[in-house]
Image: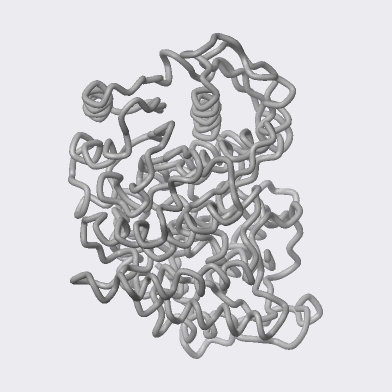
Amino acid sequence: MSERPENDDPDPIDPDLIPGPEVDAFDEMIEAETDRDPDLAVIEAGSRTLRAQAGPPTSDVPARPEDPEVDRALRAVEAELATRWGETKLDPSVQRIAALMDILGEPQRSYRSIHITGTNGKTSTARMIEALLAAFDLRTGRYTSPHVQSITERISLDGAPISAEKFIETYEDIKPYVEMVDEREDYRLSFFEVMTGMAYAAFADAPVDIAVVEVGMGGKWDATNVIDGDVAVVTPISLDHTDRLGDTPEAIAGEKSGIIKKDATVVLAQQPVEAASVMLKRAVDVDATVAREGMEFGVLAREQAVGGQLLTLRGLGGEYTDVFLPLYGAHQAHNAAVALAAVEAFFGVGTEHARTLDIDTIRSAFASVSSPGRMEVVRRSPTVVLDAAHNPAGARATAEAVTEAFGFSRLVGVVGASGDKDVRGLLEAFEPIFAEVVVTRNSTPRSMDPDELAALAVEVFGAERVQVEPRLDDALEAAITLAEEEGEYSGAGVLVTGSVITVGEARLLMGRN
């Protein structure tokens, strides 16, 4: 295990490659996060970017507002939200959010909805569903969490995050009603409950035809569960948040099955048998219709293509061939199959009528999908990939996808994980593909201490394969340097992973905004 001595003077970043004056971005991140909720991580990386990055066009992740007044107002809203319970502190109840919806006039009843739960793949699936619905000329709202870089990402209209101005306006509109509920309840509304209220209000105000809503955690008592989704989507269930949801797939499925409502259609991704059994029982109890991956729909074929993969999908109404998906990995192909089935179910395919949706529209929609921070390439020579895997199941899917899509001759990992996750399991999933791992931390209090993370990494990888860099910017530099040791044409790469927050901060440090 190696760590740069404190008195070691590292090689400076070439100033010619830095736009503007040198700014210590990581120290700014730490200072900015000191008194803020970790899940409000809107990270400012200053003007510093890491060396000579070049990659695909910037995705739909908003930067800070250019107008200083708007930026100040947004920061004020973020600061107010930060005074509330964060997403890691919960009181399992929908009582407070239901009270807010009641006083707002039930905005969530003014549009139809697709509700998404599961352990992994929720955000990517939500983005695919949104793209498909929009391709059929429906006005969409999307609510997902957590965000990669900007809090405004969580609420999208017509496929794009709402503007900072609209975010501020929505908050100010519902703030008096939030305060009324705060006064009546034993506990104030949490950060996530207020955000959910803002999303539902923004969707009603737009107005949207349909909302695509990702749960925050679980399902039964999640703040989003004041909607009655026409379609309930369950992505793959595995062990995560076990202290709150249970320590078996069956227990976790019990919580997540709470989004299945009477007469809805349930779209089930492939599940552990015990989790599937719980979901099917819930569907029977509420007279819901079930569509199962591998039975009623699924992935028939997939092959690698430049920038993604080419799929043949079986939907509820038939086959869809030559579907290009600009995302990597078998797990994303399965997410695509789930998304397609959900949209078919929304349109009544498989129940009201048996036909496929227009194939050209489906192809166009899938080709437009992006999912920032999920197998996202942000640099070439060497290639740097970001992926937000934060639990063992997600890490295994990412490891398979990286191996399949890139075939690196040598892969260096940069890992910054949250201390409340199964970090050993995450490291074990990556051990077969990482030649070396640089352990680090992100700027939030939830991030595992680098020395603790290093101790686990040494047990998994061996001391000679582990390097410690407490600062994320230094960790990225170290990993890039290790990858470059094999030469420009060696085929070495870097994978940054372990946490959505780590990935978001790395994006900014790599100049992605």
Horizontal placement of 16 versus 261: left or right? right
Q: Residue furthest bottom?
A: 7
Residue drawn at (55%, 30%) of the image: 336
Question: From where the camera sits, is residue 494 visible?
Answer: no
Q: Could you tell me which quadrant the N terminus lies in?
A: bottom left
Give 117 or 58, whichever is nearer the viewer: 117
Rendered view: 444 above or below 399 = below
Colour treatment of the image: one colour
Q: Position of residue 183 (x, y in %)?
A: 26, 76
Q: Viewer-proximal residue, 222 or 300?
A: 222
Decide if residue 197 is on the left or right side of residue 333. left
Q: Quadrant of the C terminus?
A: bottom right
Instruction: Return the residue nearer the eye: 510 or 192.
Output: 192
Image location of residue 218, percent across then percent down: 29, 47
Residue 98 in sight here: yes
- In this image, 256 relative to 246: left or right? right
Q: Position of residue 355 (x, y in %)?
A: 60, 10
Residue 420 against residue 31 in the figure, above or below: above
Identify which residue is drawn at 55% across, 74% down.
Answer: 43
Q: Quadrant of residue 313?
A: top right
Instruction: Tell me the residue at 41%/42% (across/down).
Output: 120
Where residue 414 sits in the image (x, y, percent)?
50, 60
* Residue 504 position (above or below residue 124): below
| Residue drawn at the location 36% of the way across and 43% of the way down | 119
